[in-house]
Amino acid sequence: QKLVQWSPTDIKAKMLEKYPPKVARKRSKQILINEAMENTTPEITANVRTIPGIITMRGCTYAGCKGVIMGPTSDIVNLVHGPIGCSFYAWLTRRNQSSYTGENNENFITYCMSTDMQDSDIIFGGEKKLAAAIQEAYDLFHPKGIAVFATCPVGLIGDDIHAVAKKMKEKFGDCNVFAFSCEGYKGVSQSAGHHIANNQVFTHLVGKSTTEKTDKYKINLLGEYNIGGDGFEIDRILKKCGITNIATFSGNSTYDQFASANQADLSCVMCHRSINYVADMLETKYGIPWIKVNFIGAEATAKSLRKIATYFGDQDLIDKVEAVIAEEMPAVDAAVKDVLPRTTGKTAMIFVGGSRAHHYQELFKEMGMKTISAGYEFAHRDDYEGRQIIPDLKVDADSRNIEEIEVEPDPVLFKPRKTEAEIEALEKAGFAFKDYEGIIPDMEKDTLIVDDLNQYEAEKLVELMKPDLFCAGIKEKFSIQKLGIPMKQLHSYDSGGPYAGFVGAINFYNEIDRLVNSRVWSYMKAPWQENPELSATYVWE
Ligand code: CFN
Ligand code: HCA
């Protein structure tokens, strides 16, 4: 068999060659040959509409709002106003776990609640049906809160879900009812749904708690959704260090956690893409600064803990964090040492939502593996470049219909957690508050970065670059495996996890080792193996 080594330029050209010229031109701007931040690195186009006809990996705005941000909340009734399919789709598919039992077992995560709209509701309007469903949920559960989510038809027929929510809230008096205009068609991806969710959570929940949080070193953990139990492992570590996580947005979260987030000393942002709006609003209204953290990868976990300790600056905390790291790392080191001979030099591709395609590269690096191609489904340019980018109006037009809420400092509750002099001293000592990382500067030269990868391009990439492992979601899983390449879901973790923190890193090393070294994949015949014309190999220098 003839072996051909494709250059990144060849690969890009081959990915585009079958497209009509207009489509190729557009997609070309979303495929970047990485120059690893040398001056020649061109901009990547992101957060733009998927070209009709392309089978995208993306989800919709409703998925981003109902599924991602609000889905993991334990004791708020999540009621979907729409046809049953939308609710069924969002029913426990995201593997966000919850340990909350409440006083009366008020954990509603396992339920699937919907108004089950029918043709007649579409024609005559569904507001009465929605009010009846809210009443039913209230009578059944007497929850602290009921959240209502709009699906596409609700926006199209013009049901006023906010008016219904307000009326019911006034009627009950002891239950906070609020709604999200997160119709699936809004915006270009899940990302618009995050924004809508963030705005409403901030407006209707944050600051509403009556209990005072008095612990030392209080943080909010923003953008951690407890997929596969990641949040449990992070909480275990934080607790061991003496850091109190008063509110996770929104893994294993409760009504009261959201409501007390304004009392934290510091917000730690894990998935910047999905939650940066809340972090900024907490800072503006209550004076809570935020820092970027990442608990995916053992080294990244240690770095994030040190960063939190440095922010607070107390020697006791700094020592405690070092002691915890010293206690946890030997098991991690032993696990890495075990897998390294089998995983070093293996290659991976990662295509997931808006932050994991970057965060998981840390774990692969620890295993001596290279990420040769990666990209996000829906991240914005700031996630690619790792810096705040002034929104481009043209691009913003694609995240349509998101009402920006006005946030002003609260005259009573705004209290800067550190004085300006303290902040300046921290920054002088090299402490970066807003140093959120970017996939472009962090990936190696000549890697391929692809925004909003689609089914066709995924198969093409695998064919041309032949990675040892492909990471994406359920829609990609089986088509990739049929090509003879092991596939790991980095949304749902298949049924594995946790992968965050120290214990998570060990789990990940062992699972990936098994995957990339399993012989079963060599028995598969991919189309190019059966057809010699397609034979090619990608050699990593
Ligand atoms: S848990 Fe998060 S980490 S919230 Fe976001 S951008 Fe999705 S649901 Mo799927 S796995 Fe994914 Fe990220 Fe943030 Fe999850 S990479 S696509 S919307 N995501
Ligand atoms: C979503 C949720 C999702 C989908 C995962 C997948 C998740 O986008 O609606 O495609 O496997 O993590 O559950 O991203």
Image (cartoon, grey):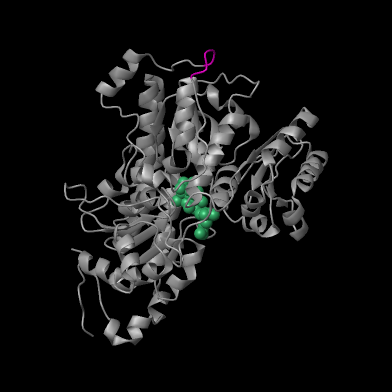
Q: Residue 70: where, in percent of width, then height? A: 60, 43
Q: Does the magenta segment cover residue 412? A: yes
Q: Does the magenta segment cover residue 23? A: no
Q: Say if residue 350 shows up in the picture.
A: yes
Q: Residue 415: where, in percent of width, then height? A: 47, 15
For the C terminus, give its image quadrant.
bottom left
Q: Is residue 224 left or right of residue 255?
A: left
Q: Residue 40: where, in percent of width, then height? A: 17, 50
The residue under the point 40% across, 56% down is 509
Residue 106 drawn above or below residue 44: above
Residue 473 drawn above or below residue 211: below
Q: Is residue 219 left or right of residue 70?
A: left
The residue under the point 30% across, 63% down is 25
Q: Is residue 103 left or right of residue 4?
A: right
Residue 1 drawn above or below residue 432: below
Q: Nearer the viewer, residue 6 or 244?
A: 6
Q: Residue 84: where, in percent of width, then height? A: 70, 58
Q: Say if residue 250 shows up in the picture.
A: no
Number of numbered callouts drawn: 0
- Name the quadrant containing residue 2: bottom left
- Name the quadrant containing residue 434: top left
For the N terminus, give its image quadrant.
bottom left
- Name the quadrant containing residue 458: bottom left
Predominant secondary structure, magenta span:
loop
The residue under the point 74% across, 56% down is 123
Q: Nearer the viewer, residue 86 or 91?
A: 86
Q: Nearer the viewer, residue 202 or 98?
A: 202
Start and end of the magenta stretch? 409-413
